Image (tube, rainbow, N blue to C red):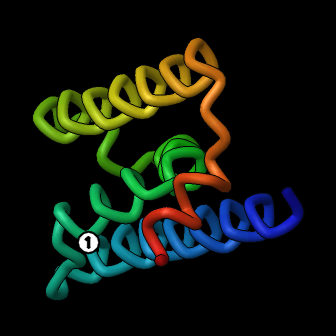
Amino acid sequence: MKVLLLYFFIVNSIEFILAGYDKYLATKHKRRIPENTLFAIAFFGGSVGLVLAMLLFRHKTSKSSFIIKFSAIIFIQILIAVLLFVYKVNIFNIALFLTS
């Protein structure tokens, strides 16, 4: 369980920093971080970091296409969590299966 918490802390921290840096790049009119990169990190556990960055930096909050895609990612994550809970799947068994 500690490993999972550490993973989510690191992934969300990376997502938060990248979104903040993307906002900085946007204000300086420089080359930006691709949205697909932000979406990929959010999908693999960085959703909370992206939400916090969006609220704190007011970044990507008015871009409806970004909001729709990000909402789809959160919906998929909630669906996966509910399915894992309903079927009482142990995620550590899945991780062991995938790594073997």
Pick the residue in front: 83 or 14. Answer: 83
Q: In the displayed structure, would residue 88 be above or below residue 31?
A: above
Read off the residue under disc 1: 26
Q: Residue at x 15, y 86 (%)?
A: 31
Query: In x, y percent, where is residue 29?
Result: 18, 80
Q: In the displayed structure, would residue 56 be above or below residue 27?
A: above
Query: In x, y percent, where is residue 47?
Result: 49, 47
Considering every residue shown, the one lying at the far top of the view is: 86
Q: In the displayed structure, would residue 91 be above or below residue 95?
A: above
* Residue 1 located left or right of residue 42: right
Q: Quadrant of residue 13?
A: bottom right
Please name the amino acid that badge 1 sits on.
Ala
Query: In x, y percent, where is residue 14?
Result: 55, 75
Considering every residue shown, the one lying at the far right of the view is: 2
Query: In x, y percent, where is residue 25?
Result: 30, 80
Q: Residues within 10 Å of mark 1 (few under 14, many from 20)?
A: some
Q: Residue at x 44, y 29 (%)?
A: 80
Pick the residue in front: 71 or 91. Answer: 91
Q: Residue at x 52, y 42 (%)?
A: 51
| Residue 57 visible in rendering | no
Q: Residue at x 48, y 20 (%)?
A: 83
Q: In the displayed structure, would residue 71 be above or below residue 2?
A: above
| Residue 68 visible in rendering | yes
Image quadrant holding the N terminus, namely bottom right
Q: Quadrant of residue 12?
A: bottom right
Q: Quadrant of residue 44?
A: bottom left
* Residue 35 located left or right of residue 5: left
**SS of the residue under disc 1:** helix
